[in-house]
Amino acid sequence: DAGVTQSPTHLIKTRGQQVTLRCSPKSGHDTVSWYQQALGQGPQFIFQYYEEEERQRGNFPDRFSGHQFPNYSSELNVNALLLGDSALYLCASSPTGGGYGYTFGSGTRLTVV
Amino acid sequence: GQNIDQPTEMTATEGAIVQTNCTYQTSGFNGLFWYQQHAGEAPTFLSYNVLDGLEEKGRFSSFLSRSKGYSYLLLKELQMKDSASYLCAVRASNNDMRFGAGTRLTVKP
């Protein structure tokens, strides 16, 4: 049973560029949440997708956008990258209603130079 | 909104018992979770409390007091591999989950 898979694992981008990160949830999960984790910090909630719609959103600017597909997979897009966007981006999936919490992917390490 | 506080760092000795605390404020409570995260890796689930009291799971136990907005994670018989960050997370009634900054535990021989 595959868990949560994220791609790519590492990425280097230049300031001002755009990036797309991808996530496939665990089998049986239909809700996908995205988190940004800076070094030494806890994960910060970006947004959550359910039934192909953004259901909740954290305190992130509109440069951060997302999408969920009919197969429950999801993308995180970040436009106009800033140096401060360098972080580990974590995708977490959960079943409807939350269940026993989230299953996390291994993350995408984004470096903006 | 949610506010979750955890101590930044702790140090303990191999074989010992250590307790790390979490205090929280939330508008609507639907569960408290503890995750372990080794450096550079994804968080992994340790425990879940939704009712007051103690949940025991092998060497790990977690306690919750909803009226006090307080939880702790207890680690027994510490091993070197327990050196990691321990993240407290609170799930709100709308099912989104917010994390504290985590406590970095260092286990020394």
Image: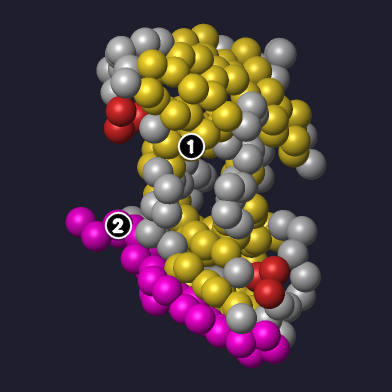
> In the figure, is residue B93 to the left or right of B104?
right
Q: Chain of mark 2?
A: A
Relative to B88, does residue A67 appear above or below in the rendering? below
Q: Which residue corresponds to mark 1?
A: B85
Visible residue check, residue B57:
no
Q: Nearer the viewer, residue B15 or A109?
A: B15
Q: Nearer the viewer, residue B106 or B60?
A: B106
Q: Residue furthest left?
A: A1
The amino acid type found where label 2 is placed reads Gly
Asked if the residue at tag 1 contacts the one at tag 2, i.e. Cβ–Cβ closer than 8 Å, the answer is no
Residue B93 sits inside the magenta stretch = no
Q: Which residue is mark 2?
A: A3
Measured as percent of width and height from the top left, residue A32 is found at: 50, 61
Q: Is residue B17 visible?
A: yes
Residue at (39% x, 25% y) in the render: B107
Q: Secondary structure at mark 2?
A: loop
Per the rendered image, the range of residues in magenta is A1-27
Q: Nearer the viewer, residue B90 or B77?
A: B77
In x, y percent, where is residue A66?
A: 60, 75
Tell me if mark 2 has few (under 14), some (14-19) or many (20+) residues whose alpha carbon lies within 10 angstroms of its own: some
User: Which chain does the numbered disc 1 sit on?
Assistant: B
Would residue B65 be found to the left or right of residue A105 on screen? right
Label of residue A69 in the image: none
Up the image or down, B21 lies above or below A38; here it is: above
Task: Give the image quarter of residue A7.
Answer: bottom left
